[in-house]
Image: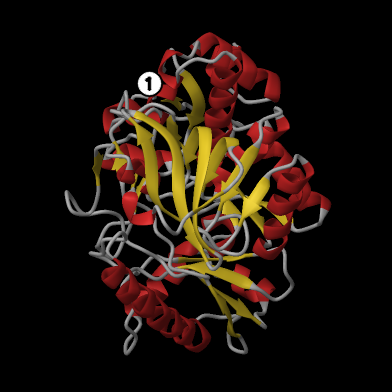
Amino acid sequence: MQTYSKTFQDLPKASIVVVGSGSAGATAAITAASLGADVTLIERYGFMGGISTQVLDTIYGFYTPGQSPRKVVGGIPDQIIQELFDHQAAIYRPNTYGAGQGITYDPEILKIAWEQLARKVGVKILYHSLVIDVIKNGDHISGVMLVNKSGLYRLMADAIIDASGDADVAALAGVPFESAQDQPVQSLTTTFKLINVDVPRAKQVKKAQLHELMASAQGYDLPRKEGSAHISPLHGVMVTNMTRVTNIDPNNVEQLSTAETEGRRQALEYTRFLIDKVPGYEKAALGGLSTQIGVRESRRIFGAYRLTRQDVLAARKFEDAIAMCGAPIEEHHAGKDTRWEYLPEGQTVDIPYRCLLPQNVDGLLVAGRCLSADHDAHAAVRSMGQCMAMGQAAAVAAVICLQNKQSLHTLSISKLQTSLLELGAILDTAS
């Protein structure tokens, strides 16, 4: 820490610091502040939302797939959805690609919705800031070091929620994890949207036909042969999830930089294919690329419990459940297709609180796709709906522990679950 001793400045201490404002972090910050905590949110971009506003336009995980969709996420996340519908910027979209019913939205409006909700409950937001180190007293994390255009800063906190997606804070704190250095992680995707589309005609192109056109296309470099294109709330706009960049370590900046370039190259190639070969796209044009390439998987921490493939496929229940997931294992591997493995019809797996509780440290929780889970379990529970539910749970846990002056490791699970249910969260314990 002496490296920074002559240059850092102190920021006012916060009760809770949330690092990263993706669907997990944004929900965590809003939840904690709505419960009365003094919250500072650190975000490296100039807007909130993470993947939800940088890359994607559909929230999955709120509903189970199958013949009778069941809502499994609720509470503070419902406020986000309501804001989108209040702005007429969202639609419910039955999904034909495997993940179940989704909520498709305008990402530009979601940027504003996240921000307005956060400001309304008093979240202090630090944009354009990146955490570069942690402050520890023994095994307890008591603060973070961050850098931005104004300089180097130290920010102390009573509790920290790592919602960075890449487990940046946990890694800096010495929490054990798995990453691309240990085994291949899921491929990365640059999403893009097309404007001036004849949407009624494009909608007539069903999944099987689109995939057949991809498979038979000559003269096009299409690494993924079963990508999707779907409607949006915007007139004449279709949004894609098609590109596939493989064998990348998202925590290696040189590899990630290469992936950004390759993802955009592929986006232009898929655009050419759609305009040339798919009905409805004849007059279309590339209308926008994701802010950054979409990362599905990077670091996964080792927590007090590690969710497994067997847990997911058996729809296992846990006494310390803090969220539910009915989504299938959806692995975007290095091949031309995607591997899907489903839970029993209509069933869900619980996400335990212990998956948010890192090993070897106190004062820290993780939320979102950096939770403690193996590769296959992660491929099921990484959906935005579950990330929002995890963020909500982490925030409630932190607030309870601060109020009772106790460790995150000694939290009363029944108290946590009761508080979550009072917020409107959905848990099997409710029955």
Total tally of numbered discs in the picture: 1
Up-down: is 425 above or below 366? Answer: above
Judging depth in this view, the residue of 229 and 178 nearest the camera is 178
Judging depth in this view, the residue of 186 and 199 nearest the camera is 186
Helix, strand or loop under label 1 = loop
Quadrant assignment for the C terminus: top right
- Is any atom of residue 251 visible in this view? yes
Question: Which residue is painted at 43% across and 32% down in the image?
Answer: 364
Up-down: is 264 above or below 67? Answer: below
Residue 329: which quarter of the image? top left
Question: Which residue is painted at 36% across and 44% down in the image?
Answer: 379
Colouring convention used in this rendered image of the protein: secondary structure
Residue 169 at x, y = what percent?
Answer: 39, 45
In the image, what residue type sits under mark 1?
Answer: Arg
Q: Is residue 88 left or right of residue 73?
A: right
Q: What residue does disc 1 label? A: 316
Q: Is residue 398 left or right of residue 257?
A: right
Q: Is residue 213 left or right of residue 110?
A: left
Residue 241 at x, y = what percent?
Answer: 47, 65
Question: Which residue is painted at 56% across and 16% down in the image?
Answer: 417
Question: Which residue is painted at 44% across and 59% down in the image?
Answer: 7
Up-down: is 196 above or below 383? Answer: below
| Mark 1 surroundings within 10 Å by alpha-carbon count, few (fewer than 14), some (14 through 19), many (20 or more) | some
Residue 375: which quarter of the image? top left
The residue most toward the left is 182
Judging depth in this view, the residue of 362 and 217 nearest the camera is 362
- Is any atom of residue 81 visible in this view? no
Residue 349 at x, y = what percent?
Answer: 43, 26
